[in-house]
Image: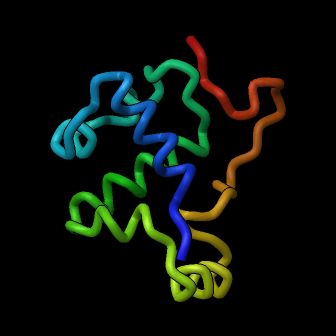
Amino acid sequence: MTINQKGLKVLAKLAAAGYTDEKKIVNMSLDDMFRLSGIKLEEIYIINELQKHIKANKLIAFFIITDDDKEAESDVGGGANDNTDGLETDDDTGGEYNE
């Protein structure tokens, strides 16, 4: 069992941007996500997965990765707690979106 460190980092960014409760996070649109300062595409994927977990009342399951979760992710090629997002960028920003 491990802690989803990437999820915690994204949660800290959301809190710093004023998204301090579940309702605000769940109601975020894609445009809201892109407006976050220094947000990366991988982090938008993580926010989306966080929204799904909040809606399903499985917030703890998002932040705690069990051995069973790791096995399931390897069987299907990834998941909310892996370090890939299936997106590639060709620029120097590392997937970061800045206006």
Q: Is residue 47 above or below residue 55?
A: above
Is residue 96 shown left or right of residue 6? right
Q: Residue at x 83, y 33 (%)?
A: 90
Q: Residue at x 60, y 24 (%)?
A: 97
Q: Is residue 28 above or below residue 18?
A: below
Foreground residue, 76 or 15? 15
Q: Residue at x 20, y 66 (%)?
A: 57
Visual colour scheme? rainbow
Q: Residue furthest left?
A: 23
Where residue 67 sits: x, y (%)? Answer: 56, 85
The count of marks equals 0
Foreground residue, 61 or 31? 61
Quadrant where the C terminus sits is top right
Is residue 89 shown left or right of residue 67? right
Where residue 35 sits: x, y (%)? Answer: 44, 20
Q: Is residue 6 above or below residue 74?
A: above
Q: Is residue 16 above or below residue 95?
A: above
Foreground residue, 88 or 11? 11
Where residue 84 sits: x, y (%)? Answer: 69, 57
Q: Residue at x 67, y 82 (%)?
A: 74
Where residue 13 sits: x, y (%)? Answer: 45, 31
